[in-house]
Amino acid sequence: MQMTPSLVLLVEDHHDLAETVGEFLALHQITVDFAHNCQSAITLLQQNPYHCVVLDINLPDGTGYEVCHYLRETLGLSLPVIMLTARDTLGDKLQGFDAGADDYLIKPFELKELVARITAQIKRVRGLVGHVQLSVGDLELRPRTNQVMLAGREIELPPIQFRLLALLMRHAPEVVSRQCMEMELWGDEAPDSDALRSHLYSLRKLIDKPFGRKLIHTLPGVGVKLEAAG
């Protein structure tokens, strides 16, 4: 399956390095938001549905450890975090993992390796590695084979509906915001038209209507959730 556009938060106070990394990631369908200190990083994390955070440790107003701990414990975010730092001792690495980091890359580094690590972490979270199967009640989604099964019956979904269903299943029964759905499907270049509503309508026609029951629920002004029928 083709990698969908991703939004990454790069927390780095070295402006030239941040610009270089951002330009390289853009070549690989990865859009970057920049934060140069802890406070701006926390503000952006509160406002945007990032797919991954690349986080320096030494920052002007604190440390990357503090940002990582905050996004895990206070914001409750499970998105991947990659520490990107010149601090290379075992103690530094252990402290990073203890704060909630998923990966640790030492400066200087190869840009291609950073892209590979970001891509691997995002694919892992999206269930696109190994043979991870998503299931909600009797609804099953098999990412490696692009199969969807409902009540033992295979359902063929177009690519966008497949990605949308996978997102809803990964978060089920939690509500997924419109912003998060648009970011998953189109990155930061969502269509001007109400394309998301049309794709949700098409998905409901394939998942809900033929079975006479409702799995996809809209909460006006909040978002959409997928919940197994009772």
Image (spheres, rainbow, N blue to C red):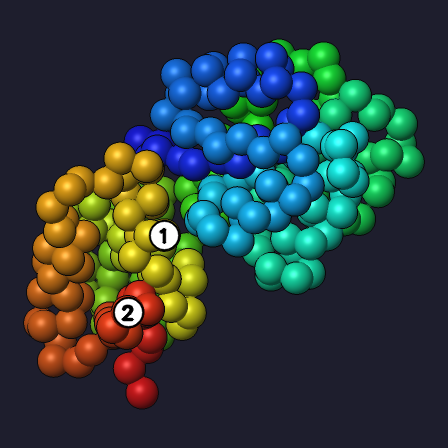
Q: Residue furthest bottom?
A: 230
Q: Are marks 2 and 1 in contact (CB under 8 Å)?
A: no
Residue 131 seen anywhere in this rendered image of the structure: no
The residue singled out by tag 2 in the image is 221
**Image height of 15 relative to 38, above or below:** above
Q: Residue at x 45, y 48 (%)?
A: 48
Secondary structure of residue under mark 2: loop
Task: Name the quarter where the C terminus is drawn.
Answer: bottom left
The residue singled out by tag 1 in the image is 180
Task: Name the quarter where the N terminus is drawn.
Answer: top left
Q: Is residue 172 left or right of residue 152?
A: right
**Image height of 209 relative to 192, above or below:** below
Which quarter of the picture shows residue 204?
A: bottom left
Image location of residue 164, percent across then percent down:
27, 53
Task: Give the spatial CA distance, label 2 vs label 1.
Answer: 13 Å
Image location of residue 127, percent across then percent down:
44, 47
Label placed on residue 162: none
Which quarter of the picture shows residue 190?
A: top left
Q: Residue at x 89, y 27 (%)?
A: 89
Nearer to me, 177 or 203: 177
**Image height of 59 relative to 124, above or below:** above
Residue 82 seen anywhere in this rendered image of the structure: yes
Secondary structure of residue under mark 1: helix
- Amino acid type at image mark 2: Gly
Query: Which numbered disc flags the more N-terminal residue, 2 or 1?
Result: 1
Image location of residue 75, percent across then percent down:
60, 59
- Amino acid type at image mark 1: Cys
